Image (cartoon, grey):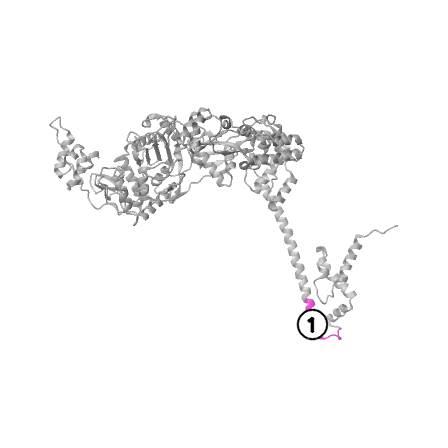
Amino acid sequence: MNMKKDNPEDKNKIRRKTVSSKRPDSSKKTGSGDEDLILPSERGKSKSSNQRRSSSSNPASKTRSVSASGSAGRDRKPNTNKKTRSKNASNSLKRKLKIKRRKKIIGGVVAAAIIVFAGGLGFIFASLKDVKPVNENLLDKLTHQTTTIKYANGETLSTAPTLYKKTPVPLSDMSPYLRKAIVSIEDERFYSHSGVDYWGLARSIVKTLTGSRQGGSTVPMQVSKTLLTSSDQTYSRKIKDIYYALEMSKTVNKDKILETYLNNYFVGKGLCGAEAGSLGYFNKHANELSLGEAAMLAGVTRNPSKYAPYITSRISGDESKADLNHKLLFFLATEGLAAANKTEKDMYEKLYEWDLVDEDTYKQLKSGDLLVRKAISNPDAKVRQQVVLAKMKQLGVITDKQYVAAVNEKINIQFPDSKEEVANSVESLVEYDVVSALMEQGKTEEEARNMYYNGGLIINTTIDPKIQKSIEKEYENNSNFPNDTVAANGLSQPQSASVIIDYRTGNIKGLIGGRNIKARKTLNRAITPYQPGSTIKPLSVYTPAIDTQKVTQSTLVSDSRGGYRFKENRADNPETTTNGYGSMSLRHALALSSNTIAYKTGELLGPTYDDCIDVMMDYLRNFGITSILDFKEENKAGMQRSDRHFNSLVLGGLTKGVSPLQMASAFGTLANGGTYVEPEVFTTVTSFNGELIIKNTPQTHKVVDPEVAYVMTDMLTAVVKEGIGNNASLNSGIPVAGKTGSTNSYLDTWFVGYTPYYVGSTYIGDDAGIKNSDGSSVPRRTIEGGGSMSSAKLWGRIMNRVHQNLEYKTFVKPDKVYMTMVSPTDGGKTSYGVLAAFIDGTAPDRYSFTPVLPKKPKVTNPNQNPRAGIGGATGGANGTGGATGGAYGTGGATGGAYGTRSNYGTRSSGTRGY
């Protein structure tokens, strides 16, 4: 049977007619029905055609049309015609406005689409403006790059150390299982796509829009992200990755791209690349991996922190040598792990006997500097391994039999033997600071460490090679360290640390964190807190007192024990360090490091005991000392600790202590006119191609006015010129301001000081917690040679090297500081004392009561001590002092100065010969 084929146009007419037949009378409602079916191209002629259809088919409509012309319509009421005409006109206007609005909307959408398209093209072109040609040579060059650390002058300091450095190997030297596992789980269409898997990319976009996450990056795109761009989550970076992946696939064969990926992908625990990962986890080369090991190493890529093949565990004490062989991990005690328990300490001897640790590691375990853990298999890694194996089976890469065997394979975690190198304190600080800065940019610790070790970074440090070598040279001289010995555990004692900073910029110019230590990890004593002793006094007591105008450096305070303002201090009753010389100026008290006068000065800082503590803690924090505890903290023994004690804040017996680095920065604040500058060890970090990754700008803030800082500087120069820090003076005569410090029995000794050029901090002390090989405790020893004087001497020797050939200059005095001659002891005005600094309007108005010494008499008896003659005369002249003063010359005069009251004369400062 012949059937007429449907004509699409006829169908369209039928559809329109059907709809039209259902529409209501236009007199009831206009702007509906057919209006909504009109296409944009028909919209201009829709009105006339509708009217024609209405006029020809509806007599009423025709009648209305005639009536509207004014020549007919006598059968209708005039008012009704007016209302109808008004309604029709209104509806017509609405239709026009609606059409106009739609035109605007459509035009806007089209314009927006054009703008977005043009803008998108512009963004793409802008993103690709600095791309480079990709070829095999470039990939090889980038694969072999390592992070380089540079001195401030651009010379190479070192390459970033890592236990298992990235070791590129050709694809033929990698297990076929590893190659198949990576392609299966990371990029199953790797050998068929042109660099970008568009299906995978689309799926990734859909997943992202629906709130899920799925990687859409191919192996070439990941090579781009690792070597050519960055890990930043930006559209610009992703556009570059797509471009480089496409270009790479044109110019480099697929096997070479896969080889590049396998040599550069991060496998966790500081390991980068197939060879390093194989050695670091399984103690075998990449071409020796089994199917199970290869699948586990391939599975790490999704989340290296979670899927690394091992996790750490404490030693139980039941392990055999085989259980621990090649499975030990070592951590610094400062890395936040729990301290060693008795079981672990008991195992140290076995580890040493079994040759599982070398002598230097054993030393640090015994001293508490290092902690040990063992590696055990990670259950999450096993789960991820099975996902990889299942994918390989699904794709037909392995058989069912191979799958079952690999799932049941026992994975043996083993570490290779490591080479021990002399620890470098600068490198450890650079690593810590750079990794921290990268983490602040949003990277995980694993990503940051991988970037640091293997990212080909250029790290520009602040270290001056001349200054660094000056410090190292003095640390090679064992005579600089009193009673130098090698302890039973092999560690050199005493230990030491020194830091030198340019206080104007905060740049660390030189640093050393220990002596004669050779190990994979070592304690950096330059950033480790120790008890600061009296070095804290200028920061917690004297600067606040000068700044709040409670005192001047000429203020007289009694050195006698007792007479404390607060009952808490009367209970402490600290011993004086100056043998109770009597009243003396704060300048002289600081020079002699009087404990009692520091206490009494601290009591002036507030109306109550707690107020004084608040003031001292606020100043210490502003000086950059962050290790003080202003709250109750529970230590590992379960005891509550806090530094809210007058004694701790005045005499430096803090809970945690202060590091040499923080002490140097704090004193540098005074040298810098009262402005604190955060210390920094690096200035910039750039990529291999010069792209800036980090610009390190130190934070600064004002602590005190320049006038206050200069008065403190003047007082601290008295410590070196007139007090117990004279070992720190420089041969060139360049002025030195500083402070000594020591703890009880001189177990910790310090000198922190500065010149018009640099600030430096030196610490010497026996390490705490030393044990003999039999486990018995070795008490910490006194630092001989006057305690803090040894630190001052070492500081002076280092700084003499540093300042060699530097131009002589002095500290710059602010305009509002007034210099006047005062007695070095009682602070009164005099014509023959020392020039002292005072903030304008605070200079003393009293005169010194120190008597003028008579001329030295001629010695007639050769057996007579000439000083005794002077003393006799002085003693007689003043009625006090007498023989005691005479024995030490000028001391007699000082003794007399305290007197007219005979009870002070016998306690003259002549007993020390000042």
Residue 154: image location, x then y, percent = 45, 31
Residue most extreme to the left: 860
Q: Nearer the viewer, residue 403 or 308?
A: 403
Point out the residue furthest to the front here. 318
Per the image, the residue denoted by label 1 is 82
Left or right relative to 282: residue 84: right
Closest to the observer, 181 or 757: 181
Q: Nearer the viewer, residue 607 or 771?
A: 771
Give the residue furthest to the right: 1
Secondary structure mostly taken by the magenta-highlighted segment of the chain = helix
* Percent x, y of residue 619: 35, 44
Q: Specify the segment rendered in magenta.
A: 72-89
Residue at point 62%, 51% (across, down): 112
In the rendered image, residue 498 lying in the magenta stretch gets the answer: no
Q: Horizontal and vertical percent for residue 436?
A: 47, 38
- Residue 812 in sight from this viewpoint: no
Whether residue 74 is in magenta: the answer is yes
- 14 left or right, relative to 759: right
Under circle 1, the secondary element is helix
Tell me where residue 495 sits by quadrant: top left
